[in-house]
Amino acid sequence: MGLLTILKKMKQKEKEIRLLMLGLDNAGKTTILKRFIGEDINKIEPTLGFNIQTLEHRGFKLNVWDIGGQKSLRSYWRNYFESTDGLIWVVDSADKWRLDDCKTELHQLLQEERLAGATLLVFANKQDLPGALSGGELRQELDLDSIRSHHWHIQWCSAVSGEKLLDGIDWIIADIASRIFTLE
C-alpha cells in the first residue's frame, strides 16, 4: 500500500478495509465468504471471475474480493491488487499434493509491489477433513517463517462449520487498524 493511501485514510479517518481473498482453486474462498454473509454454502460452484461483498464487522466496513483460483485465472489476480489493505490466503489443508504450487503462488504474490505492506492472513482451511495438515505443519510447508515483508498470521479453520473464521478476521482487522488508522 502506498504512502498516499495511508495518509488519505489517516486524514479521512475512514474505517473501510479492502481485503483480497486468494488461493488455489477449491481451497474454500467462496465458502468462507458465503459463511461470513450468511448465505447457503450447500451449493457452491467454482468462481470463474470474482465475488465482491461488503460487510460490517467491529465498526469497520470490509470490502472482500474473492477471486477465482484456477490456474488460468491467476494471471488476472494482479488486476485486483490496488489499494489492498489485507491479503487472505486460503489453503486446502487436506490437499497435500498441491502444497508446492500453493507455496510458490503465495511467495510470488508477496513480491508484488502493490501488495507491499498488506497484512497477510493464511486460513488453513478444511481442518474438518481427515488427514488435514495442522496450522503448524502448513506454516512449515509454506515456509511462512521466511516472510519478513508482511505482518502475517496463520489460522486453522473450517469454512463448512465456520469454526475459527472470526478469529482470523478479528486478527487481520486489528493488524490493519493498528497500522493505518489513527486514534480518534
Image (cartoon, rainbow, N blue to C red):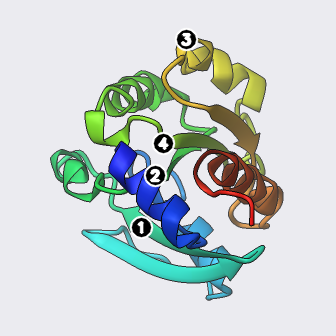
Quarter location, residue 184: bottom right
Residue drawn at (71%, 66%), measured in percent from left and top?
A: 160
Amino acid type at circle 4 is Ala
Tell me residue 170's x, y (percent): 77, 58
Q: Identify residue for label 3.
A: 146
Amino acid type at circle 3 is Ser
Residue drawn at (36%, 40%), measured in percent from left and top?
A: 115
Provide the secondary structure element on which disc 4 rests.
Answer: loop
Q: Identify residue for label 1.
A: 65
Give the mark toward the camera: 2 or 3: 2
Tell me residue 124's x, y (percent): 66, 41
Give the mark toward the camera: 1 or 2: 2
Q: CA distance from mark 3 to mark 1?
A: 26 Å
- Whether label 3 touches label 4, CB < 8 Å: no
Q: Identify residue for label 2.
A: 6
Provide the secondary structure element on which disc 3 rests.
Answer: helix
Asked if residue 64 lies left or right of residue 174, the reply is left
In the displayed structure, would residue 132 be above or below residue 104?
A: below
Asked if residue 13 lies left or right of residue 130, the reply is left
Tell me residue 164's x, y (percent): 82, 56
Residue 118 marker: 4
- Whether label 3 touches label 1, CB < 8 Å: no
User: Which comes before the other along the chain, label 2 or label 3?
Assistant: 2
Would you say residue 69 is visible in this rendering? yes
Give the mark toward the camera: 4 or 1: 4
Give the mark toward the camera: 3 or 4: 4
Amino acid type at circle 1 is Trp
